[in-house]
Amino acid sequence: MTTPAAPGTPPATPPATSPVTSPAETPGGAPAETPAGTPALHIEVDGSPAADPELLATLMSGYGHFTAMQVRDGRTQGLGLHLERLDRSTRELFDRGLDGGRVRALVGGALEAAGRRDASVRVYVYEGARTVVTVRAPFPPDRTPQALRSVAYWRPAAHIKHLGGFGQTFHGEAARRAGFDEALLTASDGEIAEGAVTNIAFWDGTSVIWPSAPCLAGITMALLAPRLPSTTRRVTLADLPGFRSAFVTNSRGIAPVSRIDGVELTVDGELMDRVYAAYAAAPWETV
């Protein structure tokens, strides 16, 4: 217990408060000196230092967007749509544009360096409009009928082909482990949006119906819709028995859907021939 001071006695001076010493400070509070030659950022991969840690940190951020295309003989379908989407998403995410001419030059340079005229190409855009191009062997079209498993999940900011798609990848892998080919993303009330990595369309015998729920407007979908008798409206899992057929689309091509959950769908050869012909009619543009 503290004994009260006698009347007239001035109060004792409180002790000085000691600042909390941070790891970057010496015990006396002065900033610790960084040894000469110490990098601002050091990253190791499997025990080996990264050659460009700043670039690697950017790539690891998970914040950005991309586009994917199939290139044949140095050309691709929907090039203008790819460039427009890259510019639009860069403006939305980073408040700056992305010059289409520069993207074409980067893709062309990467194809030349890789020694490929036929390739699967991706263009990734990160903070500061840093642009990464990947080139690998082309993916041949896979027209195998697909079985889809519905999951109650929608991609955030679905209109952007963004990075960090853990949710859709998680559900897609779970669907494959359960014996399906892909996940079908739906709302909790069953409204259908898109596949995990595809757009989906339904056929009622007269029209191709694209779901109106938030989704990515894929390039293949954008090329097909005006070349087919298309309409857009709300589609739910409860509507499935009323459709004759369905198909999915992405940058690797188009495939019919054979079933969704327990609902069997007809693989309509005549319809698919019409869809493939519509896609083949889209012009090829030089990268």
Image (cartoon, rainbow, N blue to C red):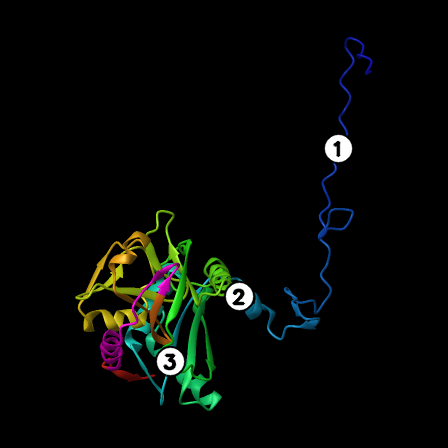
User: Of all residues shown, which one is farthest toward the top?
Assistant: 7
The magenta segment is 259-280
Q: Is 268 a magenta residue? A: yes
| Residue 68 location (% of width, % of height) | 39, 74
**Res. 9 visible in picture:** yes
Residue at screen point 28% across, 84% down: 284
On the rendered image, what quadrant is the C terminus found in? bottom left
Q: Is 141 a magenta residue? A: no
Residue at screen point 33% across, 65% down: 199
* Residue designated by label 1: 16
Helix, strand or loop under label 3: loop
Between discs 2 and 1, the one toward the N terminus: 1
Nearest to viewer (mark 3 / mark 1): 3
Disc number placed over residue 141 in the picture, else none: 3
* Residue designated by label 2: 58
| Residue 120 location (% of width, % of height) | 42, 80
